[in-house]
RNA sequence: GCUGGUGUAGCACAGUCGGUAGUGCAGCUGAUUCGUAAUCAGCAGGUCGUGUGUUCGAGUCACAUCACCAGCUCCA
């Protein structure tokens, strides 16, 4: 008999030689039916793996991420098997499970089309119906290489070659298909009840643009058809929130072919929201001791040579004139604010009494992104950020970093985005071959150690992103996902010791010695265009009242109420609210419908009764008819909602 | 930049085998003065993303180019 320890501490006895599936059955047949994999002493394994005496045992179901990964990873093998059956010449690359699905990369002569996907799906259905058992076997490195060659899989050979020499390599076989794979997998293909291939795209082998572009098929799968349908419906729903569609429909922004890619026009509504956010951030920063600066949008190449941008970032810059002709003046639009804002500090000799010096600027930047990178308002070529640089004595670093993080969390929380944010400690990669980073290993290790200590002291729950640092230092990036699950940085806080040195920044300390300051680069709300995009998606266009471009629309029922309507508009406008009158000759139902579709927070319906009583009939987009109020009551309700920045 | 897809009126779409462009909503004009998600009628609006080519003839076919979308790479 074997003894397994369960999660609740109880001990389960099973026959010698029992598999993890047998153990699951021993717990309960229902659990065994839902089981996708298991954990032995915390290590994920297939259900077919033998139970180990004395091990801690756990059954993985759909409720666990590991369980879902096993399920989807097996689906990717079914996909690969179907592709190999239909297109024997296709070469296999990799096929992992990802969040919400899986993909598999193939090297094929001609990329798959939508029609091919249908054929492949049909073949996958057959494979699932055949209920083929998956079996694991291991080979030595040499045997594995021979196996890869025998299968005619050059990419698998490359993968094996890069694994450590003494590694034991596992393969999974399912009928006529075998794949190099760490696993684990479902016991058979029959468990995959519902799946769908979603898209076919290109992807570079090993993620390197110098390598061949492979053909990637994305898909997803679920244990029940209803769950798949629900997922597809959720994807459809996400598309409706897409800022790039909704933001154009609701007239927040537009683009014009003649102006160019990545250069959106902010229409009155979008421009208003961004103005509101900017005023708020500038005021918040002023309250926190920031000094306001306004620095040029361009500079001579000489400045970028000092900062290192000329060497490290030139491809990303808009350069005017001949970059190669050293005799002539050459200007470039700024891709970052740092070297400009440092000049404020450098304006005169500084003492320790000047520090901390907190500089803030609503800063417009220009980056010549590659043509395929642009996306709505999220990735653009000209954008405006709530920029700031803090020049510090070393002992001020931790406290100021904490305050930067607090400010970022406060503004993200206020706009309602904090709950969906994740934190990433972005570090350098000493092995990066592209000469991406400035400075020495010692400087990097010091900056990262300092930052790591601060993050740990502050209890920040972060993931580490290797090779995600800026060229001059490590970053804490606050990440946000768009409706399609694609992640971008919304706020960044960076520690920099290199640029201070390059620009010769120093201060006289209490002991009369010249010392090098630390610098924090940070944003409060990141890039306003990007933030607007996320807000449109988060609220599906119904922005909270305090930031809504139009807060109230007055809807007179007939033209007898027009004078009252315009007087009311002027009254509310003077109080600082954003109000319009819909005085068109239309029925009130029509006007309400339009205001609802534009997601306006409040509609004030005015008929003879309201005019007579001097009141307003209030309708909110959320709760419908709120009944009649006096004008003062409504104004007070609105004031409280705006001042508290209610969501 | 790379792979694939898309591009017809402000928006959503139709347009057959290559034969000279339609529908609905929006807009404008008129009538209607109406109580919580669409009043009725009329009018106007498009060198079919752009360019070149094939053809007697191109929205339709070919090539190039631009923009948009998904993904890769890159990044706030």
Image (spheres, grey):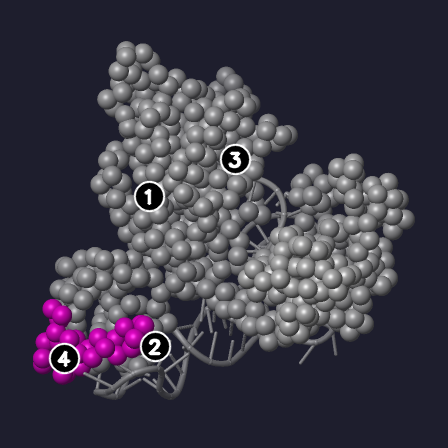
Is the residue under label 1 in contact with that under label 3 (CB below 8 Å)?
no
Q: Nearer the viewer, residue A452 or A524?
A: A452
Q: Which residue is mark 1?
A: A406
Q: Which circle's residue, 1 or 2, is located before the other in the chain?
A: 1
Q: Is residue A456 left or right of residue A221?
A: left
Q: Which residue is mark 3?
A: A427
Which subunit holds the residue at mark 2?
A
- Magenta part of the protein: which range? A605-633
Which residue is labeled 2 in the image?
A593
Q: CA distance from mark 4 to mark 2?
A: 21 Å
Q: Nearer the viewer, residue B8 or A607?
A: A607
Q: Are marks 3 and 1 on the same chain?
A: yes
CA gap between label 4 and label 3 equals: 63 Å
* On-image quarter of the C terminus of chain A: bottom left
Alpha carbon separation for disc pair 4 and 1: 47 Å
Crowd tier of the residue under label 1, counting other residues whose Cα lies within 10 Å: few below 14, some 14–19, many 20 or above: few
* Whole-percent x, y for residue A331 in the image: 45, 27
Which mark is drawn over residue A610? 4
């Amino acid at each position: 008999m074997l003894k397994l320890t369960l999660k609740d501490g109880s001990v389960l006895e099973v026959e010698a030689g029992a598999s993890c599936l047998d153990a699951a059955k021993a717990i309960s047949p229902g659990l065994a039916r839902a089981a996708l994999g298991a954990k032995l002493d915390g290590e994920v394994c297939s259900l077919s793996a033998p139970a180990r005496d004395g091990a801690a045992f756990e059954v993985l179901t759909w409720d666990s991420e590991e369980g879902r990964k096993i399920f989807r990873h097996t689906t990717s093998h079914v996909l690969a098997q179907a592709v190999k059956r239909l297109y024997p010449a296709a070469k296999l690359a990799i096929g992992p499970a990802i969040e919400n699905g899986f993909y598999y990369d193939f090297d094929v002569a001609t990329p798959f089309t939508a029609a091919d996907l249908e054929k492949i799906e049909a073949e996958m259905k057959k494979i699932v119906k055949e209920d083929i058992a998956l079996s694991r076997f291991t080979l030595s490195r040499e045997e594995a290489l021979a196996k890869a060659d025998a299968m005619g899989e050059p990419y698998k050979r490359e993968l094996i070659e890069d694994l450590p020499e003494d590694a034991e390599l596992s393969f999974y076989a399912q009928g006529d298909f075998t794949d190099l794979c760490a696993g684990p997998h479902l016991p058979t293909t029959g468990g995959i009840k519902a799946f769908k291939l979603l898209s076919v795209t290109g992807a570079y082998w090993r993620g390197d643009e110098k390598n061949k572009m492979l053909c990637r098929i994305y898909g997803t799968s679920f244990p029940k058809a209803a769950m798949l349908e629900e997922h597809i419906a959720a994807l459809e729903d996400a598309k409706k929130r897409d800022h790039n569609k909704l933001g154009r429909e609701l007239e927040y922004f537009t683009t014009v072919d003649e102006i160019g890619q990545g250069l959106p026009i902010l229409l009155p509504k979008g421009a208003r929201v961004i103005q509101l956010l900017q005023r708020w951030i500038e005021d918040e920063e002023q309250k926190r001791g920031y000094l306001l600066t306004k620095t040029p949008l361009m500079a001579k190449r000489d400045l970028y040579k000092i900062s290192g941008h000329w060497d490290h970032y030139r491809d990303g810059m808009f350069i005017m004139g001949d970059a190669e002709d050293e005799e002539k003046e050459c200007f470039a639009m700024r891709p970052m604010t740092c070297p400009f804002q440092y000049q404020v500090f450098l304006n005169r000799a500084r003492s320790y009494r000047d520090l901390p010096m907190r500089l803030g600027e609503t800063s417009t930047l220009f980056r010549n992104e590659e043509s395929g990178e642009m996306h709505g308002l999220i990735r653009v070529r000209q954008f405006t950020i709530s920029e700031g640089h803090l020049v510090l004595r070393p002992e001020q670093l931790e406290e100021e970093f904490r305050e930067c993080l607090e400010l970022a969390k406060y503004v993200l929380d206020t706009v309602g985005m904090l709950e969906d944010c994740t934190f990433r400690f972005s570090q350098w990669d000493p092995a990066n071959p592209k000469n991406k980073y400035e400075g020495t290993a010692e400087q990097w290790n010091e900056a990262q150690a300092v930052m790591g200590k601060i993050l740990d002291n502050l209890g920040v729950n972060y993931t580490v992103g290797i090779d995600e640092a800026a060229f001059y230092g490590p970053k804490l990036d606050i990440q946000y996902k768009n409706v399609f699950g694609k992640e971008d940085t919304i706020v960044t806080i960076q520690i920099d010791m290199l640029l201070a040195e390059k620009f010769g920044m120093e201060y006289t300390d209490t002991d009369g010695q010249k010392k090098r300051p630390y610098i924090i680069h940070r944003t409060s709300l990141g890039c306003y265009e990007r933030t607007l995009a996320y807000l449109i998606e988060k609220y599906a266009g119904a922005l909270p009242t305090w930031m809504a471009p139009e807060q109230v629309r007055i809807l007179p029922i007939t033209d007898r109420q027009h004078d009252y309507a315009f007087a009311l508009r002027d009254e509310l406008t003077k109080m600082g609210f954003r109000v319009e009158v819909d005085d068109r000759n239309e029925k009130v139902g029509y006007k309400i419908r339009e205001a609802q579709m534009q997601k306006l927070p409040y509609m004030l319906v005015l008929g003879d009764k309201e005019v007579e009583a001097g009141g307003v009939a209030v309708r909110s987009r959320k709760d419908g008819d709120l009944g009649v109020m006096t004008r003062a009551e409504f104004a007070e309700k609105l004031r409280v909602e705006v001042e508290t920045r209610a969501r």
